[in-house]
Image (tube, rainbow, N blue to C red):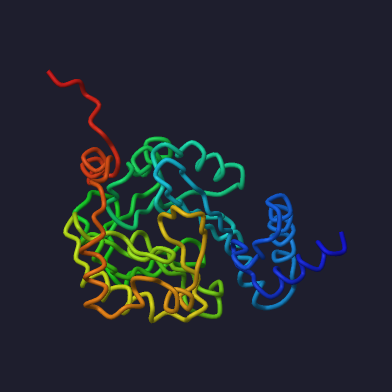
Amino acid sequence: MMMLTKLVSLFSTKNKFASLSSIPLFLSPSLITRLQMESSYTASSHSSSSSSQSSKLLFRQLFEKESSTYTYLLADVSHPDRPALLIDPVDKTVDRDLSVVQDLGLKLIYAMNTHVHADHVTGTGIIKSKVPSVKSVISKASGSKADMLIEPGEKIHFGNLFLEVRATPGHTLGCVTYVTGDGPDQPQPRMAFTGDALLIRGCGRTDFQGGSSEQLYNSVHSKIFTLPKETLIYPAHDYRGFTVSTVGEEKLYNPRLTKDLETYKSIMKNLNLPYPKMIDIAVPANLVCGLQDETPKA
C-alpha cells in the first residue's frame, strides 16, 4: 500500500495527463488500473492553480476494437450545463458512448469527426437520431454533410473551454486536427486530436481519398509539430496498444515524419497497404453524416 501511495503521488502530481502514459511497463494491469483510479481522484482534488484549471475538463478515451478507433469524450464539468462533445464516434459503439455521457451527467452538444473515415462508419448520424439536439461537425473541405461545416482557425466552444481547428490535409483532403485552447483558463498541457494525420510513431496512409504524402508531411510539420513539445497527441487509431504521445516524442521518434521530405515520400509510396475492407461502405455513409439509406431497393 505504501508503494501504491508513492506511485500515485508521483504520477498524479507531476504528470496530470488524462492517461498515464508514463507508467512503468513493469507494473501489472491491475495495479495500473488502481493507479488510474487513484490518480484521477488525486488530480481532481489537488489544490494547485494548474490542476484547478485542468479539473474543468472531463476527458475519456474510448476504444472500438474492430477498427481500432479511439473516440474521445470531452466536457466542461465546471459549467452548470456540463456541456460535452464526442470526437470520432463509431456507429457500433454509440450506445456505449451515450451511456457514458448519461452516467457522468453530461449534456452532449457536438458529435465531431476529424475527417471522412474509410475504415468505419461514423456514429454521428445515429447519435443525432437518438439525441436530436446534438450538432454534427466536420470540415467544409471534407465535402461531407453536417450541421456545422468548420474551417481552419474556427473555435468550437463547449462551456468555457474550446477546441481550435487546424487544417491537416494529406491523409484526406478534409482532415483537421482539434487542439484544446491556449490560455490561462484552458487545460494544460494542451491536447491535439490528430485523426489519421499523425498517429503514434506513424501517420495515416496517403494513397486514396485525395491523399498526398507531401501535403501530409507539410501539414504535420507546420500545424502539429509547431505546438509546444508537451502537447499530448491523441490519434484516431492505434494498432499496437499505444494510447497517447506528445509532440516532443513524435518529433524525436516518429519513424516516418522525422525523415526529410523525399525519404518520407519514398516510405509512403512503398507501403503497399491492402485496400481498406470497409471503404466502399464507410465513405459513402460518412459523406452523409453516417446515415445510411435503409430503404429497400426495387
Q: Is residue 289 above or below residue 48?
A: above
| Residue 178, percent from left and from top | 39, 65
Q: Residue furthest top?
A: 298
288 or 203: which is nearer to us?
203
- Residue 153 lies left or right of residue 297; in this view the side is right
- Residue 281 lies left or right of residue 80; in this view the side is left
Q: Residue at x 70, y 68 (%)?
A: 12
18 or 245: which is nearer to us?
245
| Residue 101, percent from left and from top | 54, 45
Q: Quadrant of the N terminus?
A: bottom right
Q: Is residue 282 above or below residue 49?
A: above
Q: Residue furthest left?
A: 298
Q: Is residue 101 above or below residue 205?
A: above
| Residue 100, percent from left and from top | 56, 44
Q: Residue furthest right?
A: 2
Q: Is residue 149 above or below residue 7?
A: above
Q: Quadrant of the C terminus?
A: top left
- Residue 216 lies left or right of residue 93; in this view the side is left
- Residue 78 lies left or right of residue 255; in this view the side is right
Image quadrant in which you'd find residue 56: bottom right
